[in-house]
Amino acid sequence: MSRRHDPRRAKAHRTYDFAEIAELFDVTVATARKWRKEGLQPIDDRRPYLFSGCELAEFLTSKNQPRQPLNPGEIYCVGCKCAVEPAGNEAFVRAMTPTSVQLIARCPIGHEVQVRVRIEDLREKAGTLNLRYEDGGAPLGESGHGPRIDSSEGDEE
């Protein structure tokens, strides 16, 4: 299943019920019902609910908006469904591969957020975040993983 559905599959002059929508977009009937709660409007309030193909295509087009780029120091929180600055302006760094690390932080309401970053892009992506190295480990570069990042007591300057 895909998160982005092709709105061109819905024919403008046709009507669809939940089962037909589910089959057309390869989703479950529960997902089609969820779309109604998210704003997909039926033709009228009588059951079975019928949806015009034109309305269905418009709804899916609005759901398929492109992702917004993150500003330096922001992490996308899946729970909040928006870009947030981590609580305490702090993130932990965990080495993943020789060329990438994982930034781990908490959003302002407490969700844990994670983003994988290439080591060469870490300074740019972290912005003004205070970086702490997980388990008191050495800053990147001392263990042979990527370029050295200046730090004092684990904080980026």
Image (spheres, rainbow, N blue to C red):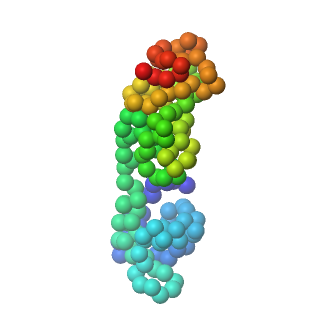
Instruction: Using the image as rendered, state which of residue 50 and residue 142 is in the foreground.
Output: 142
Residue 147, placed above or below residue 79: above
Question: Residue 116: in sight, yes or no?
Answer: no
Picture residue at 43% right of the left edge, 78% below the top: 42
Picture residue at 57% right of the left edge, 69% below the top: 29
Q: How far across and down, in percent of the image, does residue 102 sit?
A: 54, 31
Question: Residue 25: in sight, yes or no?
Answer: yes
Task: Place residue 96 in its image quadrant.
Answer: top right
Task: Place residue 139 in its image quadrant.
Answer: top right
Picture residue at 40% right of the left edge, 30% below the top: 128
Q: Across the whole image, how many numbered discs are drawn on residues?
A: 0
Residue 12, placed above or below residue 140: below
Q: How far across and down, in percent of the image, does residue 100 sit?
A: 52, 25
Q: How far across and down, in percent of the image, does residue 57 sit?
A: 38, 66
Residue 113, placed above or below residue 33: above
Q: Is residue 44 left or right of residue 32?
A: left
